Image: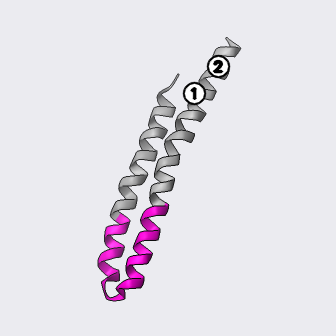
Amino acid sequence: MENMMEGIALAKALAIGIGAIGPGIGVGFIGAKALEAIGRNPEASGKILATMILAIAFAEAIAIYALVIAFSIH
């Protein structure tokens, strides 16, 4: 029984750990490209910022899905 609980804990850790890698990279990429775009065209910073925040929210939703999967493992 103890080995099973350790396996479940490992599965949960891997689910959230691996599931957070992609969104973490994505958010960094989104932020970098948004700052690059604002640097090229500062007048469009309002539109770029709004689009960036929306894209980050979608990327973070994937991490939340991984968290839900991790909690559902039992």
State the image coordinates of residue 56 (x, y, percent, origin top left). Answer: 40, 60
State the image coordinates of residue 63 (x, y, percent, origin top left). Answer: 46, 46
Q: Which residue is mark 1?
A: 11
**Depth order, front residue of 36/56:** 36
Q: At label 1, which amino acid type do we have?
A: Ala
Classify 10 Å Cα crowding around label 2: few (below 14), some (14-19), many (20 and above): few
Q: Is residue 65 left or right of residue 2?
A: left
Query: Which of the two labelled residues, at mark 2 and mark 1, occupies the earlier sequence position?
Result: 2
Label 2, label 1: how many angstroms apart (C-alpha)? 10 Å
**Depth order, front residue of 7/71:** 7
What kind of secondary structure does the magenta stretch mostly adopt?
A: helix
Q: Which residue is mark 2?
A: 5
State the image coordinates of residue 39 (x, y, percent, origin top left). Answer: 42, 84
User: How has the structure been colored for display?
Assistant: one colour
- Residue bounds of the magenta highlight: 28-53
Classify 10 Å Cα crowding around label 1: few (below 14), some (14-19), many (20 and above): some
**Depth order, front residue of 64/35:** 35
Q: Residue at x 46, y 62 (%)?
A: 29
- What residue occupies the far right of the structure in this picture? 2
Q: Residue at x 46, y 51 (%)?
A: 23
Q: Where's the N terminus, which quadrant?
A: top right
Quadrant assignment, res 35: bottom left
Quadrant assignment, res 57: bottom left
- What residue occupies the far top of the structure in this picture? 1
Q: Residue at x 51, y 33 (%)?
A: 70
Element type at mark 1: helix
Q: Is residue 40 left or right of residue 72?
A: left
Determine if the magenta segment contains residue 40. yes
State the image coordinates of residue 43 (x, y, percent, origin top left). Answer: 32, 88
Question: In the displayed structure, would residue 17 be above or below residue 38?
Answer: above
